[in-house]
Amino acid sequence: MSQKATIRVFIADDHAIVREGLKQILADSPDIIVAGESENGLDAIKLFRKSKCHVMLLDISMPDKSGIDVLKQVKKEHPEMAVLMLSMHREDQYAIRSLKAGAAGYLTKQSAPKELVTAIRQVASGQKYVSAALAQELAAQVGEDHATALHDTLSDREYQTLTMIASGKTVSAIAEELSLSVKTISEYRARLLVKMKLKNSAELTHYAIKNQLIE
């Protein structure tokens, strides 16, 4: 896509104030318009189908359906679609998972407005976008001959459960936030403990801190 062409953007984020902030930032770019938005994952998939957008800005932490699950569904239906993931998380936590799932790029919400506009234009033109810091991290991983970390063996939901437990949230609180049953979250917790050879949430939290998976 030519940079002079109008880039239609769809915003999927459960925080209204974030959506409004993104729209204000993009309003200053004459070649970009916001053509649709949603506040949860299921609506994002449904409304995006009708929006005829070129780029989706997708929050990785949606209340009803994880951003990576939404990403996979969108890419399944529209393989050519450019999805730019937005997150409050440190880049090395979810960026690689997002890129492997088909994201065209990954930005933290702390990124400068100018970087967001640059990223949108870049992914709309068919390229990938990652920050300089993340590019260095990816290059380092490619250059190193290292064993797969235990947390890299987890599914996306298991990994999300890990980081939330390590952040001090209870199983009940996680279930409510993700709109899942307590039983389901308990199963995720049990599976990830087995995969990571850990005994309890205390060991899990220690692992997450040691490996810088949480702030």
Image (cartoon, rainbow, N blue to C red):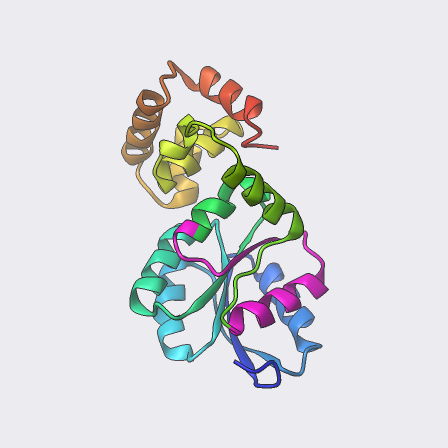
16 magenta-colored = no
Q: Residue, x 67% and y 51% (percent of image)?
A: 110
Looking at the image, which residue sits at the far top?
Answer: 199
Q: Looking at the figure, which quarter contains the C terminus?
A: top right
Q: Residue, x 47% and y 16% (percent of image)?
A: 202
Tell me which corner region of the image, top left, top right, bottom left or bottom right, holds residue 189: top left
* Residue 199: % across, % down: 37, 13
Looking at the image, residue 158 lies above or below residue 56? above
* Residue 163: % across, % down: 48, 33
Tell me which corner region of the image, top left, top right, bottom left or bottom right, holds residue 170: top left
* Residue 20: % across, % down: 62, 67
Looking at the image, residue 200 lies above or below residue 179? above
Q: In front: 44, or 137?
A: 137
Is residue 200 among what the camera can see?
yes
Is residue 64 among what the camera can see?
no
Tell me which corner region of the image, top left, top right, bottom left or bottom right, holds residue 23: bottom right
Q: How many marks?
A: 0
Q: Residue, x 30% and y 63% (percent of image)?
A: 76
Q: In front: 50, or 3?
A: 3
Q: In front: 70, or 178?
A: 70
* Residue 173: % across, % down: 44, 34
Q: Residue, x 45% and y 52% (percent of image)?
A: 99
Looking at the image, residue 53 lies above or below residue 63? below
Q: Tell me which segment is drawn in magenta.
A: 100-125
For residue 126, side relative to residue 192 (left or right): right
